[in-house]
C-alpha cells in the first residue's frame, strides 16, 4: 500500500493539487481574517492574501512539486511574475465580478480559484519550471520533453 501511495505522490499533478489545496486554504483563511479584522476594502484583502499565498506556493512548487530547486531561480521568478500577474487579473476580476452579482466573498474566491487551477498547473509545469533542453536532451521548445523523470520528492 505504501509503495502505491509513493508512486501516486511522485506524479507532479498530485503534489501540485496537494500544495494548491493547502495554499488555497491559507489564501481563503487570510482573506477572511483581513476582511473581518481590518478596515481594508475587499480589493485590498484579496490582493494581500493572493500575493502572500503565491510567495509560499512558488517555493513549494519549485522544490517539491516540479523538482526545480537546483536550476537558476532568476528565470523562474521572471516567468512566475508574468504567470501570477495574469492569474491575479483573472482572480480579482472574477472575485469582484461575482461579488457584484451578490456572491459571498469566500465563495467568489473559491470559484475563481477553481477556474485558474488548470491554467496554473500548465504554466508551472511547462513554462515557469520547465526543464532546459540540456537536462532533457530535447529541443527547448518541446512541451513536456523529459517529464517522465521521477522526482525523488
Image (tube, rainbow, N blue to C red):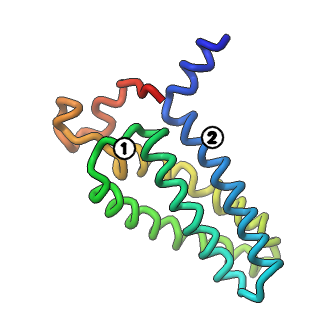
Kindly indicate the quadrant of the structure image that contains residue 38: bottom right
Task: Give x and y (percent) for residue 129.
Answer: 36, 47
Q: Residue at x 72, y 67 (%)?
A: 30
Residue 79 % position (x, y): 34, 60
Residue drawn at the location 71% of the way across and 55% of the way down: 25
**Of 20 and 116, the residue lying toward us:** 20
Marks 2 and 1, how far apart at CA: 18 Å
Q: Which residue in the structure is indicated by mark 1?
A: 69
As displayed, is residue 40 above or below residue 99? below
Seen from the viewer's position, the closer of residues 76 and 95 is 76
> Alpha-carbon neighbours of circle 1 within 10 Å: few (<14), some, or many (≥20)?
some
- Residue drawn at the location 60% of the way across and 45% of the way down: 19
- Identify the image quadrant of the N terminus: top right
Above-or-below relation of 87 to 47: above
Vertical relation: 89 (above or below) 2: below
Which secondary structure lies at badge 2? helix
Q: Which residue is mark 2?
A: 18
How packed mark 2 is, by other alpha carbons closer than 10 Å (few <14, some 14-19, many 20 or more), is: some
Which mark lies nearer to you, 2 or 1? 1
Amino acid at each position: 500500500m505504501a509503495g502505491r501511495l509513493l508512486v501516486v505522490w511522485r506524479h507532479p499533478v498530485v503534489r501540485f493539487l496537494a500544495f494548491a489545496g493547502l495554499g488555497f486554504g491559507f489564501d481563503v483563511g487570510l482573506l477572511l481574517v483581513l476582511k473581518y479584522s481590518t478596515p481594508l476594502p475587499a480589493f485590498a484583502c484579496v490582493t494581500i492574501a493572493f500575493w502572500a499565498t503565491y510567495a509560499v506556493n512558488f517555493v513549494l512548487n519549485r522544490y517539491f512539486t516540479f523538482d526545480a530547486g537546483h536550476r537558476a531561480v532568476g528565470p523562474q521568478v521572471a516567468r512566475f511574475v508574468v504567470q501570477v500577474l495574469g492569474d491575479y487579473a483573472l482572480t480579482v476580476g472574477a472575485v469582484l465580478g461575482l461579488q457584484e452579482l451578490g456572491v459571498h466573498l469566500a465563495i467568489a474566491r473559491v470559484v475563481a480559484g477553481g477556474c485558474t487551477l488548470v491554467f496554473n498547473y500548465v504554466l508551472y509545469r511547462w513554462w515557469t519550471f520547465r526543464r532546459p533542453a540540456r537536462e532533457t536532451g530535447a529541443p527547448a521548445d518541446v512541451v513536456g520533453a523529459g517529464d517522465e523523470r521521477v522526482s525523488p520528492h
